[in-house]
Amino acid sequence: MPLKIVRNNIINVKADAIVNTANPEPIVGIGVDSAIYTAAGWDRLLAEREKIGPMKPGQAAYTPAFDLDARYIIHVIGPVWQGGGCGERATVADCYRKAMEMADGLGCASIAFPLIATGTYGFPKDEALKIAMREISSFLIDHDMDVIVVVFDKLAFEISGKLFENINEYIDDHDANLIRGEQVRDFFDGAFGELDPEREYGDVMSEEAIRREREGRLSQMHSAGALQEKESAWIPPEEAEIPVSIEDLLKDPGKSFQEKLFDLIEERGLADPDVYKRANIDRKLFSKIRNPGYNPSKRTAVALAIALELDMDQTEDLLMRAGFALSVSTKFDLLIRYCIEHKIYDIFEVNCILFEYDQPILGG
């Protein structure tokens, strides 16, 4: 996928270019700067940095990466946070933009960023993240490059407080309708005999899922004659007229995922690059999706639904055609539901939310 967010130390990340928040003077600073010098080879890297000389906030320059698993280190000078009234936000944006432009000019296919200036320089992390997502997404509209945002630890990554509060409230509202898987198993064991030991029920199961399972069990038992003693109490449903045979139904199963997807794209008047960039998937994968025999992953299918700004009914219809559904009993699905219901269709914002909750991000 063109944009990834990973929790790691940037010196352990493989990319053509590694971005360093450098000291303005040709000396080794602390934090990320010190870690990169140590990993790359202190003396050789410092000698190259001295050739560049003093740098101003917002500037970018590059050196070889030496012992890092990269070709280049791009050094950027972030601003010291002074409350936001001294052009700090524009300077951070310059750092991201110039680093990507420099990497592109050097022929790099990938670049890895820290959250610039959020360490000793004190730039607010949530604002830095928004700027990073804005500049990266803008750059990727016209460029093909893999961009990795590297977050050192959980505390270094935060979505805005109000959004975090709203999402937690949304999840809590749905958690109230969930019960433990053990209760489900006890319920069925007592009422209908032991459950299939091969079946996975998970940690939680919604009341709706229990209802469906119970009805399925009753139907199976009735058809097997298990309720023969209570036959007089059984009221069978009225026989519904079946308009077509099963054979006829299978001859015309409806549109495939691919057919429906490209119908939606055409309806919206979008070009292919518009779609795969909005979905955070690369061009090669999008080409594979055009193949009628290709089966997308659930994350890819959801990413395309987000890219097309589908509502919940449209999303569920598209996912169903790929053999998927969004439940109310898994955190990933709940977060996707929240984003769609609240019309959050920026794939990078969606991925920030997923990342915050330790869920896999969208794209491919």
Image: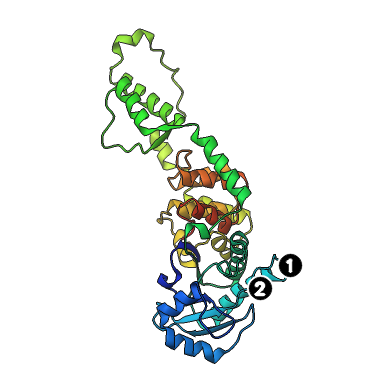
For this orientation, the residue located farthest to the top is 232
| Residue contact at pointers 1 and 2, CB within 8 angstroms | no
Mark 1 secondary-structure assignment: loop
Residue 244 seen in render = no
Towards the viewer: 65 or 259? 65
Give the farthest residue toward the bottom: 51
Where in the figure is residue 268, as x and y percent of width and height? 63, 55
Residue plotted at (43% across, 37% down) = 249
Query: What residue is shown with label 2?
Result: 91
Q: Can residue 123 be seen in this view?
A: yes
Tag 1: amino acid: Gly
Tag 1: Cα neighbours inside 10 Å, few (<14), some, or many (≥20)? few
In the displayed structure, 93 sits above or below 227; it is below
x and y percent of residue 146 in the render? Answer: 49, 70
Taking 252 as reference, is 95 above or below it? below
Q: What element does badge 2 sit on? A: helix
Rendered image quadrant of residue 224: top left
Vertical order, 27 against 80 (above or below): below
Q: On the image, numbered disc 1 is attached to which residue?
A: 85
Residue 138: percent from left, percent from top? 62, 68
First-in-chain label (1 vs 2): 1
User: How far, Cα to Cα, is label 1 from label 2?
Assistant: 12 Å
100 relative position to 238: left or right? right
Q: Nearer the viewer, mark 1 or mark 2?
A: 1
